[in-house]
Amino acid sequence: MASVRTIRKGVDLVAARAAALHTPRASIGSPLLRRELSSAVRPTARRSPSTRVAGPAAIAPVKAQAVRYASSPSDALGKTQLYDLHEAHGAKMVPFAGFAMPLQYADLSHVESHMWTREKASLFDVSHMVQHHLSGPGALEFLMKITPSSLDKLTPNTSTLSCLLEEGTGGILDDCVITRRSEDTFYFVTNAGRRTEDLAFLQAEIEAYRAKNGADSLKWDILEDRALVALQGPLAVSVLQPLINTSASTAETDLNTLYFGQCRELYITLPDGSASAEPLLISRTGYTGEDGFEISIPTSACQTLPQQVVELLLADKNSTRLAGLAARDSLRLEAGMCLYGHDISTAQTPPDAALGWVVGRDRRDPATATFHGASVILPQIASPKSLKQRRVGLTVEKGSPAREGAKVVDLSDPANPVEVGVVTSGLPSPSLGGTNIAMAYVKNGLHKKGTELGVQVRNKVRKATVVGMPWIESKFHRPS
């Protein structure tokens, strides 16, 4: 992984581009991180008690700000509820999506932390993400308008990956995980780097829906009073299970019966033997391809509960360690997962991004489809050949890795290579012994597995081969 000094050198060069794109997300260990470090140009307020978004004044305008480096503390950067804990554990803090976030920790290098996650369990602070609660008689209809997923098929306490869609174009405004808590109650999580855009979009859509269906048709809350951590790795269940308080919890407490895409509210046993003041929302999901959980921790009854939970999860240093953005990015890329602002954006529809599967099969009838962008998306699904580009995985020959922005070329005429695509994420894979992997968009027709292409890296064309994703098979916990 590039040193922080190297990272800092590139920050100024990409700050203007990041601000212009309005998508300050990062791939760590590559120039993608440099773009994300520049996200400090978009300030985000420190987290505060739970906020009900009721009108235009609830969304602060975006203001330009000078770039801040990792070593420059700034009041403009938000701090998660676990900020002090990160510093106490020797974290290297960097600006990320408007927050001061840990890049890595003193006890493990990037590669060591990555491999620890694959072999044991790592704990990530993802409290910078935006947690939402939507309820009311119109909640289901509303969400099925702005996303293409079959949310009506979800049973209570189950979830799905989905996308917020731009009206008319069907472009991806953000990717998100949506959980149905009850018939008319939903919990969903959106990206920190899209906070301003997402809140403006949701507010406008909600106001329009309320104007048509009544003020009581929807209630929307942003859960600022909840921390969010991700426990990922093959030991995740054995680390978390002993902490579940079986006497206070009313739901099934055996985590072996909690499968990928499901959630439960469960209490934690504190060091003094008592149960936590409130239950934690424990979802079996994650962003690494490993088995694991995302744990939403309330703070309204106890401000220190996130710190208490994290310290309990870290009690056995032979099983669990803290991990930061560096490992998170390399893990998600190996798992073939997209990073908003790099691998997906409003420039792509779900079919463009090889995410056509998020469009429910029962929502593909043009005569009845009512979700945003259906008139664009459904013809693309019906006729994939109409797509101009396709998202693919590449393995690149040994040497300097292909980073974001590298040109992909057709080598059918080696003397005159023709540009046919662009790399959106890339790095040496720790799990594959440093093999260079990359995600890219290529011209339709060149997306088939085994297709040989080239990538321009440092003025040299390196051979690349289209491969299937993920590179590392996901290990999600599913019913036998």
Image (tube, rainbow, N blue to C red):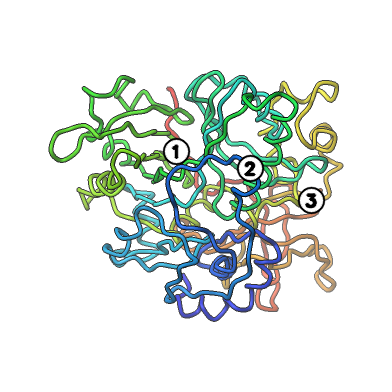
Q: In the image shown, does 374 or 440 lie closer to the viewer?
A: 374
Could you say where residue 212 lies in the image, as x and y percent from the top left?
Answer: 75, 26
Determine crowd level at label 1: few under 14, some 14-19, many 20+ residues with C-alpha closer than 10 A: some
At 78% across and 64% down in the image, what residue appears? 411
The residue where tag 3 is placed is 389
Image mark for residue 55: 2
Amino acid type at mark 3: Gln
Q: Are marks 1 and 3 in contact (CB under 8 Å)?
A: no
The residue where tag 1 is placed is 475
Task: State which quadrant residue 366 falls in.
Answer: top right
- Label 1, secondary structure: give it: loop
Q: In the image shown, does 457 or 103 lie closer to the viewer?
A: 103
Q: Which of marks 2 and 1 is nearer the N terminus?
A: 2
Amino acid type at mark 2: Gly
Amino acid type at mark 1: Lys
Q: Do the residues labelled 2 and 1 touch (CB within 8 Å)?
A: no
Residues under labels 2 and 1: Cα distance?
42 Å
Image mark for residue 360: none
At 46% across and 80% down in the image, what residue appears? 5
Could you say where residue 253 lies in the image, as x and y percent from the top left?
Answer: 29, 24
Determine crowd level at label 3: few under 14, some 14-19, many 20+ residues with C-alpha closer than 10 A: many
Assign the C terminus to one quadrant of the image: top left
